[in-house]
Image (cartoon, rainbow, N blue to C red):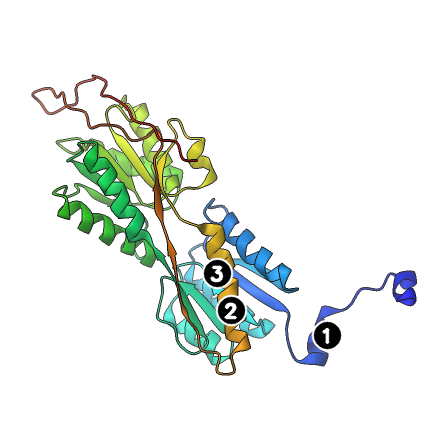
Amino acid sequence: MGAVDELNYYKNVHARRLATGTSDLFALVISDIANPFFPEVIRGFQGAAWDRGFDVLVLNTEYSSKRTETIVRRLVESDVRGVAIMTSSIEETATRELTGAGINVVFSNFCRADKFISNITVNYDAGIAQAIEHVAQLGHRRAAVIAGPEGNRTAAMITRALVSRLERKGMKPCPVKSSQYRVDAGALAVKDILNEPELPTVVFCGSDLIAMGAMSALEEAGIRIPEDVSIVGIDNIAFATLARPSLTTIHVPREKLGETAFTALDKMLKLKRHHGSEYSLETELVVRKSTAPARQNRKPNGKLARTAAGSIAIDEA
């Protein structure tokens, strides 16, 4: 150890992998590093890995199938011990490539547990049920939905849950629009809602970024939030408390998602048959100032009258 200190020696991890035949490297694959949803997922995964002495490689698909194929190939070439895939932009063929190479994989809302595969189910339905009950108690009867991107499995699951539960409450949403997970995309989707013959009293959004874009566009059109239209988001990112008004949203335990993803991989590695497990995380509604009692007064032509309704604020941030 004296020689180590004197020579300022650092171990060569590549040489160590060659000598031992094992890797200390885990990978986390996400969709978009710029999306505020993911930093807490990364923190949870990285923290759990580092606590056990492992290194983490973070990779970003940018929703590109070609880039995803390249990432999968590099993961196999790097001989990682396990991969957490926290993005919906991946196909089953990629799964087979990873598991075929003996790499343990954990997904979120993708498939059933199997050999080399674990799955974490984020129960969006629980938070959605709370959100719809909340706005129903506020007197809302006309709803619209700005969902996530078409072709995104998680977005499709959330949309089905929203539409189904709204219909059961007698609040069949109109319109139901798709949108990318970006502020500008949420703002663009609002234009179609404004062209509807009757303006909804509440808009459910597939993410907080979409919700913030929708809020901005509605306010530019002279529509007040929440007096004229209430807004509900999903994710509860840090910016949700900074929005004006602060955003009512469905909390997704993102750091816990990252921690659970690593725990699932670590558990599979310790099993001789490497059989995966099913995990579940709950969501819950966080009520802030972007929801209020539904407006009541209307002009004969169906345009909303600019009269303020009462307000509600239970800031649980």
Q: Nearer the viewer, mark 1 or mark 3?
A: 3
**Where 5 falls versus 135 (above or below)?**
below
Amino acid identity at mark 2: Leu
Horizontal and vertical percent for residue 284?
35, 46
Amino acid identity at mark 1: Arg
**Where 219 falls versus 251 (above or below)?**
above
Nearer to me, 294 or 98 = 294
Residue located farthest toward the left when viewing the structure as drawn: 300
Write down the residue under mark 3: 260
Q: Nearer the viewer, mark 1 or mark 2?
A: 2
Quadrant (top left/top right/bottom left/bottom right) for the C terminus: top left
Write down the residue under mark 1: 16
How far is disc 1 from disc 2 in space, using C-alphas?
Answer: 22 Å
Nearer to me, 316 or 224 = 316
Q: Earlier in the sequence, mark 1 or mark 3?
A: 1
Q: Residue at x 40, y 35 (%)?
A: 316
- For the question of whether residue 244 can be seen, the reply is yes
Q: Residue at x 28, y 52 (%)?
A: 125
Write down the residue under mark 2: 265
Q: Secondary structure at mark 3?
A: helix
Horizontal and vertical percent for residue 310?
24, 21
Q: Earlier in the sequence, mark 3 or mark 2?
A: 3
How far is disc 1 from disc 3 in space, using C-alphas?
Answer: 28 Å
Amino acid identity at mark 3: Thr
